[in-house]
């Protein structure tokens, strides 16, 4: 990255620069927590959701399920997002998006887009709402993590928050794209959802400890979200054979709107030499 580009990235108020078409460039605010030269999956997923929303839009349909597979390190810098229609249909469609960087696919997402109907007469929810944003208190627990993306987050915790059982609200003042390009509340909130794995961390990411990156992100959205604050009601499970799971109920200011699952690979962090 050139000195000029780096200066632009540092001063940016967005996670990404839109270079035209399906071509983008990450700024320092999208930097990951495990490596300085990678992107964090949270803003990556938000941007890929935006690309899917823009692909052959159907006003009578909305995204309802997204499965992201992280196929390797997501390099910082320039990349493209390729979107395709895998399964066309009148009431159900399956879309795919691929983030390509340095000659390979780094992230692949498949997404079901479903027809909307008026079902208010039978509307019902079972997930318990997270304690309100108004009842929360400032929380800086995400500061244990390095990286530019984490630095963009404002956090607030609610009663019951502890390692392995995270209950917190997150907000970012940064936009997904530069130049005043608008994105939906879904993009803004899902652009924070991958943070769940850090909100309720059971283990501190320190040399001699354990790392636990997720290799996927599965999201089910049963209600269209609103607002700019994401509430995460999260459980973290660590098995004894190197595999774990982070599970979250997603909230906005109106209550629960979806769920996420993240499968984890748990492995030792080498001691510093």
Image (tube, helix red, strand yellow):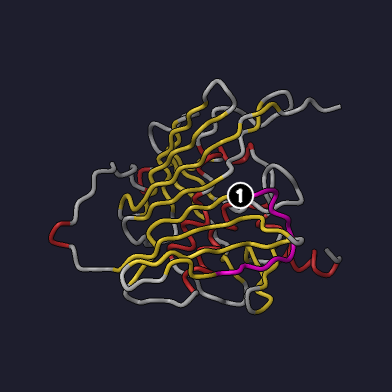
Image coords of residue 66 (percent x, y) = 45, 56
Residue at horizontal 69 percent and vertical 76 percent from the top: 19
Q: Secondary structure at mark 1?
A: strand
Specify whether residue 78 is painted magenta. yes
Q: Residue furthest left?
A: 121
Which segment is the magenta one? 71-83
Residue pictured at 66% horizontal, 55% vertical = 106
Q: Nearer the viewer, residue 237 or 129?
A: 237
Up-down: is 196 above or below 30? above
For label 1, the residue is 70
> Where's residue 233, x and y in %?
40, 40
In percent of width and height, residue 2 lies at 85, 66
Nearest the eye: 94 or 195: 94
In the image, residue 269 above or below residue 133: above
Indicate whether 231 appears above or below 163. below
Residue at 36% x, 71% y: name it. 89
Residue 5 shown left or right of residue 20 in the figure: right
Q: Is residue 119 left or right of residue 169?
A: left
For this view, does 123 lie left or right of residue 244? left
């Amino acid at each position: 990255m050139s000195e000029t580009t780096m200066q632009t990235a540092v001063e940016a108020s967005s996670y990404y620069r839109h270079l035209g078409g399906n071509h983008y460039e990450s700024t320092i605010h999208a930097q990951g927590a495990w490596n300085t030269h990678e992107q964090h999956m949270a803003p990556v997923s938000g941007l890929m959701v935006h690309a899917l929303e823009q692909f052959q839009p159907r006003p009578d349909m909305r995204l309802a399920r997204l499965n992201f597979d992280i196929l390797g390190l997501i390099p910082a810098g320039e990349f493209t997002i390729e979107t395709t229609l895998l399964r066309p249909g009148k009431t159900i469609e399956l879309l795919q998006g691929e983030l390509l960087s340095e000659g390979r696919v780094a992230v692949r997402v498949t997404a079901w887009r479903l027809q909307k109907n008026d079902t208010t007469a039978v509307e019902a929810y079972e997930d318990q709402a997270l304690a309100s944003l108004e009842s929360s208190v400032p929380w800086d627990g995400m500061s244990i993590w390095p990286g530019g993306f984490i630095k963009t987050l404002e956090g607030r915790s609610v009663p019951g928050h502890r390692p392995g059982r995270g209950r917190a609200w997150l907000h970012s003042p940064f936009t997904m794209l530069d130049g005043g390009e608008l994105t939906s509340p879904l993009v803004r909130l899902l652009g924070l959802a991958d943070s769940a794995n850090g909100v309720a961390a059971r283990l501190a990411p320190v040399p001699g400890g354990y790392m636990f990156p997720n290799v996927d992100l599965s999201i089910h959205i049963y209600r269209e979200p609103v607002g700019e604050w994401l509430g995460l009601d999260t459980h973290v499970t660590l098995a004894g054979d190197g595999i774990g799971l982070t599970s979250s109920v997603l909230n906005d200011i109106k209550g629960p709107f979806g769920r996420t699952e993240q499968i984890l690979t748990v492995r030792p962090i080498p001691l510093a030499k």
